[in-house]
Image: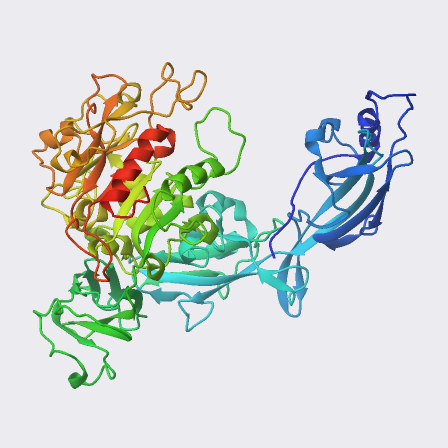
Amino acid sequence: MRKRLLITFLAPAAVLLAALYCVAGCGEDSYLGEYRENKLPAIKLTSAPVQGDTISYRINFSWIGNDRDGAVEFYEFVVCPGNPIGFDPADTTGLDKWTRTYATDSTFTFAADVYDANVLISGNYFSRYQRANTFFIRAIDDRGGRSEPAYRSFTAKTLAPYVVIEAPTNPFPGQSQMVPPIVRFQWRAEDPIDEPWNRQEADSVRLLLVPFVRETVNELNQNPAKFEDQWTPWRSCHAPGDSGTSTVIGDDELLSRTNTYVFAVQAKDEAGAVTTIFDTKLNARVFAILIGVGPLLKVSEPYLGSYSYIGDNNRPEAFKLPADFSLNFRWKADASSYGGVISSYRYGWDVMDLSDPNDWDVQPSPFITSAPPATFTSGVHTLFIEAMDNNGISTIAQMEVMTFPLRMDRPLFWVDDFYSTDFYQTNYAFPTESEHDAFWLNICSRAEGFSPGVDVYETVKRNYLPPDIETLWRYKNVIWTFSSDDRINAWDDMVRFIPESRIGQYSKLWFNFLSFYMASGGHVWTEGKSDKQGGLSAVLLPNQQTLPRNLRCEIAGVGTGCDGDTSGVFSMAYKDYCVTVLDKVGATARVDDRMPVRRIEWDALNYGYRDPTDPVTARYAGLPSRLALWETVTKPGNFFDPLVQGFPFVEFYNPGYWMIVNGLKPQSCFHPMYRMRTRNVLSHVNNVTIAFWTTKYADVEPRTGGGVAAPSVHFGLPLWYFNRAQVDSIADVIFKTWDISAR
């Protein structure tokens, strides 16, 4: 159960009641006939805690109001911490302090976030929290008269949540343990609401990793403020990717193999109470790094991604794939971290007995680093891969594949991965949710057979997760619109690429099934707000988005060069979209002597124009020659008033100033559709590509039939801000190219 209300104001009743008289019934209305003074309404609580009682923090209140010379229109309430004495009248004076309601009862969640004591219940210690609160409710009649408030003071109480670390298991609970160099900790966080047996899931958790000294755990209990700056930020227990219930230690942290560490998890509940008891048998672990746990085995597949394993007790990576997906696995292992040498590899599909050499497809050999292509029309199949070191220690990887039948029988799918709210529109700096939905539904309706009730997927309603792969494979064409904040969209996790040199145990180069969808003959039209971390730049890790960036040679970091990690050629931005260099208006600029002077007021977009030289773009005469900003967003006083600033929400591709200085040439499958005219023509990014066709799979027809071979398209800016007629014309061209136009 989630909290319904948690409001904190400080207010005493004595001065509050006097202040309320000044708000009640003092205005004049226009009447026909004799004027009568308004009689103020009255209210009383019909269900509430006993005055001064100590009670659970989730409480049901009910009330009733009446008006002798009219009718009660609605009610207003406010919740204040403390008893109603010694308050500042400003805390409750004014209508903005009160919340309107038309209900006559509700269940409220009150703050109980002040530590009281540790209590022993059924042999276990729990931390008790509480806070004094006062609830005020008043009635408002049909002439605006406000009653004297009814109120009730009480103390809300709760027991603090607790955490149990469940993995890795410790054979000697309470003692220091040895763990592999990279280890996943998993836990459960429970909240005893008011009694240990009345439990629910905690609200959020935060993590602590510090070097261990003799009194570290004792200090956590006795002097928690000492560690306050070393905790991670709070994260929801339902955070994406199971990050609220697990974490990997050692993939990003530089842990010394000669030190011992303390890892602890603290939970917080919906009333604000936090874990204050730390126990090495429950929510704190003392550990050291275990050396010699087996080779680090890295397995990769061009579309499924790359995965790492250590040891032989690994759960399979599971994939759902369309029938006849061609699987091409390769692998490599390393035992040098503990002084070992890889002596052999072997693999086998659907091995029943790992100890039986005859169940494997091949005999062990140091030269077997890949498997022949494999396809499956149905069923579930598992590939086992073993790497053995010269000491006989092995690591075994498992890749599980479940197939589903191909369909691709619907024309168009819109993945709405752009989140907004229906705020009051003022200066058109950002679309409301309704405005953005209406804009794209109008575009999608230009496709024959599109149904808004069936063919729209809103990621915000699905915990910001991408559509299921089987859902995507129902469609011949996909439009994917995204935002620029990786916390509230699925796009970033879909396209993000982990360089091979950065893959550790449990780190994954995610299965980007959108990339395989394109390779299978599906077409995509992607666009969105590409500033900050959005756009194709999401292919880079968030802390690596300094631009411009050569994707082939600098996927692992600026200045790494083409002699290092070149796995960026397998990233979606490079491999499928055919982009060589990424950059943005207002990007975090790299430190490089070759960088020209960049000024956002010069680099911002004035308008876009159709590329007059590209042969693919030249085929489509229906493309408007100019892509201008929507006149509504550029009106005087609006956010993008051209007299104030240009349009900065732009990502651009293969900029000449960086391609030339590095001796780079565009890939043959990259075809500019629109280029940018900057606010100042002296800008070094004037004339760069802001929208393009990718023809990497333009000759591929879907195996299901009924589709066409055609290019896909990407815009490095959100089209909602642009001229409606011009955008409609672009949509018509794209849909005709995809053979789904209804016009």
Q: Nearer the viewer, residue 719 or 461?
A: 719
Q: Residue at coordinates 91% horizontally, 24% vertically from top-left?
A: 37
Indicate the colouring scheme: rainbow
| Above or below, comparing residue 241 to residue 344 in the picture | above
Instruction: Examine the rendered structure and indicate whether residue 405 appears above or below residue 621.
Output: below
- The quadrant the C terminus occupies is top left
Whether residue 604 can be seen here: no
Percent across and percent down for residue 25 are: 84, 26
Residue 369, picture quadrant: bottom left
- Tell me if residue 204 comes above or below residue 371 in the rendering: above
Which residue lies most toward the top here? 643
Q: Nearer the viewer, residue 216 or 655?
A: 655
Residue 170 spot, x, y in % from top left: 42, 70
The answer to whether any part of residue 75 appears in the image is yes
Image location (x, y in percent) of residue 195: 68, 63
In the rendered image, residue 553, in percent from the top left (x then y), is placed at: 14, 43
Q: Is residue 66 left or right of residue 447?
A: right
Left or right of 364, for residue 533: right
Q: Quadrant of residue 64?
A: top right
